[in-house]
Image (spheres, rainbow, N blue to C red):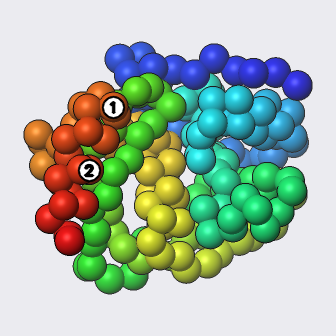
Amino acid sequence: MAILKIAKLGHPVLVNKTKEINKLHDIDIKKIIYDMSETMIDANGIGLAAPQVHLNHRLFIYRNPDVEEEEEEKIKISVLINPLIEKISEETEDDWEGCLSIPGMSGLVRRFKRIKYSAIDLNGDKLSGEVEGIHARVLQHEFDHLNGILYTSRLADKRAFGFSEEIEKFWKKNDKEKSK
């Protein structure tokens, strides 16, 4: 068990495309996933991609956002290795995102509302599915990391980026008042 160092905005590992994992047995995949899981939980994150912990592997982990914490005593973490993501429709939605590599900051990001994905799991078995809403958002965010893309390049409004506490006070408060 190890808490890994998380790369922060400005580190070159975050802007490079990762390499596909061709042979799972060539790396200690279980240890990597375990350490990444410990790191994500310790940092109170919802997802973590390999480049964020200085690894050049095409994989990420995430907590299933569709499962309420009260529903399960154990945190369920999913693993996607060599993932592919496709939009299902052109429909998008804007929502606030943060990132463990950009601590204390938030941005309003435009993402596809519904996607389908495919990947392999820890055992090399094929996975696929269709997701929408927050689940689709998390997968797109982590997938972007594998391609050297940070959420700051997908802002719906360039002004809608800043310190999370300021975003909470001014942007989100105004959004709530507008929707009343």
Residue denoted by label 1: 165
As displayed, is residue 75 above or below residue 165? Answer: below
User: Residue sitting at 70 percent across and 29 percent down?
Assistant: 42
Q: Which residue lies at the image location 24% right of the left edge and 50% below the top edge?
A: 173
| Residue 90 location (% of width, % of height) | 26, 79
Give, as a three-letter code, the residue at label 2: Lys
The residue drawn where x is 61% and y is 78% is 129
**Displayed quadrant of residue 107:** top left
Picture quadrant where residue 177 is located: bottom left
Tell whether 8 sits left or right of 57: left
Q: Is residue 180 visible?
A: yes
Q: Amino acid at mark 1?
A: Glu
Left or right: where 39 falls relative to 84: right
| Image quadrant where one finds the N terminus | top right
Q: Quadrant of residue 121?
A: bottom right
Q: Earlier in the sequence, mark 2 or mark 1?
A: 1
Which secondary structure lies at badge 1?
helix
The residue wearing badge 2 is 172
Q: CA distance from mark 2 to mark 1?
A: 10 Å
What is the x, y in percent for residue 139? 51, 58
Visible residue check, residue 119: no
Image location of residue 84, percent across then percent down: 52, 63
